[in-house]
Image: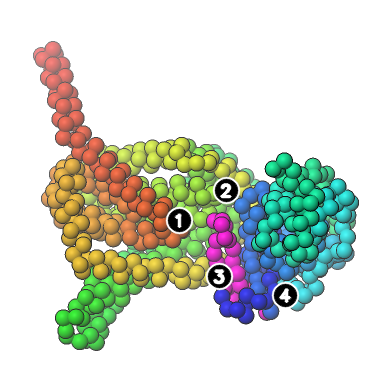
Amino acid sequence: MSDDVEHRETVALVGAPNVGKSVVFGALADSYVDVSNYPGTTVDTTQGECDDYRLTDTPGAHGISSFSEEERVTRDIVLNEADRVINVVDATQLDRDLFMTLQLLDMGIPTVVALNMMDEAAADGIEIDVEALEAELGVPVVPTVAVDGDGIGELRDRLPEASAPDETGIERFFSDLPAVEVGRARKTLLVEDDEPTARAVADADDGFDDPVGPDDAAADDAADQDGVAADGGVFASGQREAVYGNRRRRVGDVIDAVQHRGDRGRPLAERFSDLMIDPLTGTPIALAILGVIFYLIGVVVAQKVVDFLEIVVFGEYYNPAVEGVVTSVLPAANWVEPIEFLLVNDNLGLVTVTVQYILGVLLPLVIAFYLVIGVLEDSGMLPRLAVLTDRGLNRVGLNGRAIVPMIVGVGCVTMAVITTRMVGSRRERLISTALLGLAIPCSAQLGVIMGLLASLGMGWWVAYVGVLLGVLGVAGVVLDRTLPGESEALVTELPRMRIPKPRNVLRKTYNRTKMFLREAAPLFGVTAIGVSALDYAGGLDAIEAGLEPLTGLLGLPQEFGQILLLGLIRRDFAAAGMTGLELGPSQIFVGLVVITLFVPCILSMVMILKERDLKTGLVMWVGSWAVAFGVGAALAMGFAYVVPRVNAAVGGVIATFAGVIG
């Protein structure tokens, strides 16, 4: 980020989830600067530029408090970074959203209110007197329909008018505070018993800046002197309920003064929403939606589009052309050989196969995924799918939000790892990522596996699915019981259902895809160089030889070691490699189970390292080896010792029964 941007005033967009905050951000931003986790959290924040301001899009939250990670991040940005705030409010949910608005004004934060979704309010028969609302709040209020760009220009023009009333009535609660010289923002949070604020004031935190209060040193000295912290604890005013009750009454008074709600009957969208969250009607609807998602991403894009790009575009044109250029440009000398290998080798050449993976495999999948997610988000279907699948996923330590990564994983595990961002807590992201890497075959691999199992018969296919579901369930339960913490309950508000706006979906897809490529491409490049160097030095051959004891444990020939090496690079390579081995039915079955449970492909591993951390990635990688070979060895032993004895016993019973009858 440039120094110029760093020194501009910061405008934070705050609001509840699903109020169109990110749409407002996208409409205001002249350019996106960065998307990253807020320090010390797994919550994404987005930065951009708008005229002379630096924009920050905060996570959706219902208040400036510390009841959730999203609220804590929002509180820290509002307190420590923002010079002014755009509070995005859903015009159809004034009774809910004005609570945060009044909280911001109580804190004295310079605010402009974007009264969004005015078109939907009108459709619901809700009339809002915007001028009266502006007079009641004492700050600028701009009506907007962000998805259509309506009101965005006025919102931009009125940003300099951001303000807060000198008094709001919160002041009467301050009289019970100790004589702590902090600003109005922190006094408001102190009377709301916000523990991190009380602790920060008491603990003399050097990084605790107050944009609307006096300097920290004075605050900290005063805190220590006046006993904000007592008996090792933190100050608690005991006024939270009184403050909240007072604010809710003020919200009610404002709504009575500015809003008129007519009777338009129950909209069709609400009736469809009821059908989606009812298990009897919602389950078949959800299955149909998930089937369409799988078909679009897992079949159309992951197989047809990617196959065309890989086989035709890159296989017939790009790679041969690049190889020709590299060969003609580099001089004919021995010292050039490793460089040429690094650039154009068949496994992971830097300018051939790596480019093919990024542009021919990942890019179409990423675009397809973000398009689908954009449609699900904008239509309001995503939270309803989460509600429907919540109970089943609770059994493996997840909640309903994990359904999307699981479905996307069947199309592409690499892409699915990215989607675990939506799952919720870090614990649930770990579980969902581990299950994706362990027991979810990608569509490319699945296609080859289905072909091999089809030659064995339906019974082998059923057994294969049964083994994977068993491993998935056991692994989920084990992770749920061993990882510290507890699963988060699914707490989600159901936004209204609506027809997605193509412009908004395309804009989100473009921005998300651009961010993804900017972050992921360098990682793939570094990985390609490392793997190619190992390959050139003979490291991959040594690994194959070292795997011989393990392949013997599985009852498979030594050549299976080469299959495993291919699986390290791409899972479908391993499945395809098995078609060239002469194996019996039980060996094919064991081999397919092992390569399915085997480590995620190299692209998925890179993404796991990026989304999680090195330690987590290594644990998952080693754990996949253990599970794959453990299950494979058990199956091999079963086929070698148990099945013959069972067959013999069954044969004996049949012979005895036949003798009795005869």
Magenta stretch: give its range.
29-51
Q: Residue at x 14, y 13 (%)?
A: 661
Give the residue type at disc 1. Answer: Arg
Query: Which one is earlier in the sequence, the residue at label 1 or at label 2?
Result: 2
Give the residue type at disc 4. Answer: Arg
Left or right of 455 in this view: 662:
left
- Comparing marks 2 and 4, which lies closer to the viewer? 4
- Comparing marks 4 and 3, which lies closer to the viewer? 3
Q: Residue at x 25, y 84 (%)?
A: 325
Check disc 2 and report the residue beneath it: 384
Near mark 2 (Cα within 10 A), the count class, few <14, some 14-19 or many ≥20, is many
Query: Which one is earlier in the sequence, the residue at label 4 or at label 3?
Result: 3
Left or right of 324 in this view: 511:
right
Check disc 4 and report the residue beneath it: 156
Against 633, is 62 above or below?
Answer: below
Check disc 1 and report the residue beneath it: 612
Give the residue type at disc 3. Answer: Asp
Q: Is residue 388 visible?
A: no
Mark 4 vs 3: CB contact within 8 A:
no
CA distance for labels 3 and 2:
30 Å
CA distance for labels 4 and 3:
21 Å
CA distance for labels 1 and 2:
27 Å
Q: Quadrant of the C terminus?
A: top left
